[in-house]
Image (spheres, rainbow, N blue to C red):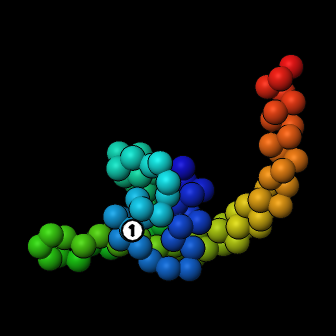
Amino acid sequence: MGRWVLMAVRGRELRFFELRGSIEGISEKMLSQTLRTLVRDGLVWRRVEHSTPPRVSYGLTPLGQGTSGPLAELFEVIRGHAYDIQATQAAFDAS
């Protein structure tokens, strides 16, 4: 899940609900756990604005920015070979 969060906040900061909406199928619990891990690892920063209700935003640290570029390139390679990957999966499943 971490890779999806890194891609979602690449180049912009997002609030928790915006992140949840941008990652299809992720539960609030899984997103919370993933964000906690990424903040702990130093890849994502977390900012709390003391308001009612509190506003919590997330974004990439410099370390996270350094990892998101290669990750984006990998996603593009996978996307470019999606047909081949699906065909290979279908052949594997059929055997």
Q: How many marks?
A: 1
Establish if 89 lies above or below 51: above
Residue closer to the observer: 70 or 27? 27
Q: In the image, is 67 to the left or to the right of 39? A: right
Q: Secondary structure at mark 1?
A: helix
Residue closer to the observer: 44 or 57? 57
Place residue 55 in its image quadrant: bottom left
Tell me if I can see residue 33 in this picture: no
Residue drawn at 34 percent across, 64 percent down: 17
Report x, y in % for residue 76: 77, 65
Residue ranking furthest to the top: 95
Residue drawn at 39 percent across, 47 percent down: 27
| The C terminus lies in quadrant | top right
Q: In the image, is 49 to the left or to the right of 33? A: left
Tell me if I can see residue 89 in this picture: yes
Q: Tag 1: residue type? A: Glu
Report x, y in % for residue 33: 40, 48
Residue drawn at 57 percent across, 73 percent down: 10
Establish if 11 lies above or below 29: below
Report x, y in % for residue 50: 17, 76
Residue closer to the observer: 65 or 29? 29
Establish if 69 lies above or below 24: below
Report x, y in % for residue 12: 50, 79
Label 1, on which residue?
Answer: 18
Place residue 69 in its image quadrant: bottom right
User: Badge 1, how many Cα within 10 Å: few under 14, some, many 20+?
Assistant: few
Residue drawn at 23 percent across, 77 percent down: 49
